[in-house]
Amino acid sequence: MAKKAKQVYQDGFSRFNCIKPTTNAVFTLIFILLAVITFLPVVFVFIISISSEASIAQHGYSFFPAELSMESYKYLWQSKDYIGRAFVNSVGITLAGTMLGLVLTSTLGYVLSRPNYYMKGIYTWLLIIPMLFSGGLVARYMVNTQIYHLKNTYWAMILPGACSTFYVVVMRTFFQTTVPDSIIESGKIDGASQLRIFTQLVLPISLPVIATIGLFLTFNYWNAWYGAMLYIDSNHRELYPLQYVLISIEKNISFMARNEDFFHEESMRNLPSETMRMAIVMVVVIPIACSYPFFQRYFVGGLTIGAVKG
Amino acid sequence: MSKINLPVKEDGTPIGKKRRRFTWDDLELTLLSLPTITWLIAFCYVPMFGIIFAFKNYKYKPGKGFLYSLFVSSKWVGFKNFEFLFRSPDIANIFRNTICYNVVFLLIGVTLPVALAIMITMLHSRKVAKVCQTAVFLPHFLSWVVISYFVYAFLSTDKGLVNAIITSMGGEAILWYQEPKYWPYLLTFINTWKTFGYSMVVYMATITGIDQSLYESAVIDGASKWQQTWGITIPLLRPVISIMFIMNVGSIFSTDFGLFFQVTRDSNSLINVTQTLDVYVHKALIQSNNYNYSSAVALLQSILGCILLVFSNIVVKKIDPESGLF
């Protein structure tokens, strides 16, 4: 798409049929302004995280702190028993959830893309009904905690979000439109089982959709906090993902003071709590901010596939 | 293999043959889909039976287990939970908040991204367009928890930037997290900030896909850029716009819990303007352990949402028979 647009704008027609320079200047200004508004909070929080605690106490949060300091990141490093653990939890949950989600969505997507599958009709309904109707939060919570006993386990943050109708539909649409039937037929003629056709013939040529759904899942799991809020008790801190660490700090600003056992005696004094909170926010945001520009085309691709038959 | 030559209906069943046999191939495919189907049943279908919470007075009987408590020892109360719910003074407010916010978000969420998408495709410099598009896409990838910290950095009473600016200009500092009157605007702004980039990209993808020869012929006929926008771009965007619009109508009873709960820091003084159905369901469950009300509201939300979705699907199909959801 990008290529096409580029080509279009380089030919004579688009040079002829374009907006006036003044209009262009106004529009450019508007978009630069929007981009600044979007990025300003991120920059602001970053500056807070590298401000010294003293300058914040004196002047409040500011874009131009009186004094810079890396104290907060140093403290983060020192409290790696807790913050580091949360980081590892977040990464682990994200990886496990993405892998599981990809397996679940791609297999069902493939099965539904087979035009002759015996139970296709039933499966389609099985997939659509949860989109229309759900048991609600209470039922979900009670079933997950009382029947599956997911409370205070990593599974509570991995399993419930692993699959969704939308992802399966995107997968199915891709397999239907992009994977040629002849490939599957040739596999069948060679006597391969469906599992083998799927893993060795279909998956290798479906990397774009795998990447798209994989990224959707990765960002979702990295940003997930509601599961931890529902299912993880405050006496299971070792299970917290980073996002929930932020919530629990928010819940109690004096959080650090209550967690003396996680910190060294000397680090308890002069804890840069304000800046440290913002430093944790940066630990969450920086991986996203650094990676999404490279991945965004997959998102756009996924969205348009999904929109075709949403 | 002989079946391949038979005439086949759209869904794959051969015409003239009532029922196809279950083949070895089907068995393999069924096995392949088994994990996902198990997941669907375990996490989507089993909880559906939980709607009986709404019709029972659930009391946990120690030592008997959850299922026994729910199915046997808890009393049926019919529609009493709903009756109590509708008698509570909060409920009108909760519905008002949910619907009003969603209507406002919907109107802004359709008009603004479309306008911006049209504008960004007109920019002379492709590079500026690309950079700005990437920049405004960022909030889509951030969680509400992170955004709540961003908001706090600006609105914190004693350290926030906004109050610092107000006081430096001689004004009085505002207790942002205690003043309900600002929050309808703040929440609208924050929600727009997070979502407009994503919607803009969706519309942009459609606009760049429009056949250029349409514009060429318009130019030959002497159409201005403004006329081209109203005469070509917007009519061709209309199917996408109406589908996005109606899809959102279907979810008018559900709100973003993170926006109304996390970003407002669950502040009690703001409850009049921030309590939506999802917030109520969550609070009734987690903070006051009121399973019955909570599930009654959730059931109501679920049913209303379901009706609206089916209804909006009918409308979508009326507008464009190709693009229905099911």
Image (cartoon, coloured by chain):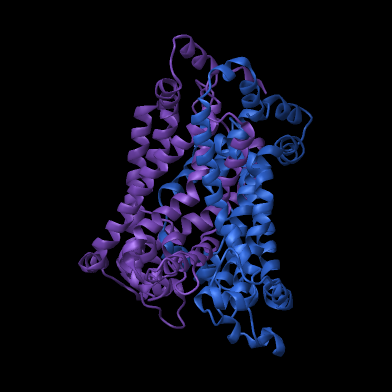
Chain colours: A blue, B purple
Q: Would you place residue B67 above or below residue B324 in this image? A: below
In this rendering, the answer to whether A192 lies above or below A4 is below
Given residues B169 and A67, the one toward you in this image is B169
- Name which quarter of the figure residue A65 lies in: bottom right
The spot of residue A28 in percent (x, y) is: 54, 37
In the picture as drawn, the residue positioned furthest to the top comes out as B220
Residue A251, position as x, y percentages in the image: 50, 76
Q: Quadrant of the N terminus of chain B?
A: top right
Residue A139, given in percent of the width and then of the height, sits at: 43, 64
Residue A40 visible (yes or no) = yes
Most extreme residue toward the right is A190
Residue B2 left/right relative to B311: right
Quarter in which the C terminus of chain B is drawn: top left
- Relative to A120, say whether B280 is above or below: below
The image quarter containing residue B209 is top right
Nearest the eye: B157 or B289 = B157
Q: Is residue B31 visible?
A: no
At 51% from the left edge and 79% from the top edge, which residue is drawn? Answer: A252
Q: Position of residue B63 (x, y in %)?
A: 47, 83
**How many numbered discs?**
0
In the image, B63 versus A28, the foreground residue is: A28
Out of B316 and B192, give the one closest to the viewer: B192
Q: Residue A194, located in which quarter of the rendered image?
A: top right
Q: Residue at x 40, y 26 (%)?
A: B321
B183 up-or-down from B174: above or below: above
